[in-house]
Image (cartoon, rainbow, N blue to C red):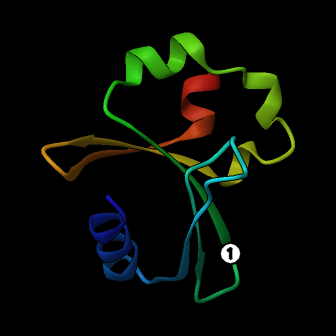
Amino acid sequence: MMCFIREYEYRNGRLNIQKRNALGLVDFTSEGTKDDTRFIIVTDSLTDLIRNIKLEDYLSIELFVYIYVIEDNEIREEIPFVQITR
């Protein structure tokens, strides 16, 4: 999974992509050229994610969190976290 996430981030101008196993709240982080940090949650089911996620855990970083919905090892949709909380 790391390969296609890394490629997607590079294509969109974001560097320093890191897989975050121990963090728990997010799967990856990346940084843009303007030092903007992106926290990435990867899921193959947006419905399941919304049903199970604890929104309060993300309050301090919600503006920087993005959900990548994957299908067949490709990112099919990129959703800003704030879009699912409103």
Residue 76 percent location from the top left of the image: 22, 45
Secondary structure type for disc 1: loop
Residue 86 in sight: no
The image quadrant where one finds the C terminus is top right
Query: In terms of depth relative to the viewer, which is nearer, 2 or 42?
Result: 2
Q: Residues within 10 Å of mark 1 (few under 14, many from 20)?
A: few
Question: Taking 4 as reference, is 21 above or below it?
Answer: above
Identify the residue shown where x is 18% and y is 51%.
Answer: 73
Residue 56 percent location from the top left of the image: 82, 24
Q: Is residue 68 toward the left or the right of residue 1 in the image? A: right
The image quadrant where one finds the N terminus is bottom left
Identify the residue shown where x is 19% and y is 53%.
Answer: 74
Question: Taking 43 as reference, is 12 above or below it?
Answer: below
Q: Is residue 61 toward the left or the right of residue 41 in the image? A: right
Residue 52 percent location from the top left of the image: 58, 14
Query: In terms of depth relative to the viewer, which is nearer, 62 or 20?
Result: 20
Amino acid on which the number 1 mark rests in the picture: Asp
Identify the residue shown where x is 52% and y is 18%.
Answer: 50
* Image-quadrant location for residue 81: top right
Residue that lies at the very extreme toward the front in this rendered image: 22
The residue that label 1 is drawn on is: 36
* Image-quadrant location for residue 85: top right
Residue that lies at the very extreme toward the left in this rendered image: 72
Identify the residue shown where x is 73% and y is 23%.
Answer: 55
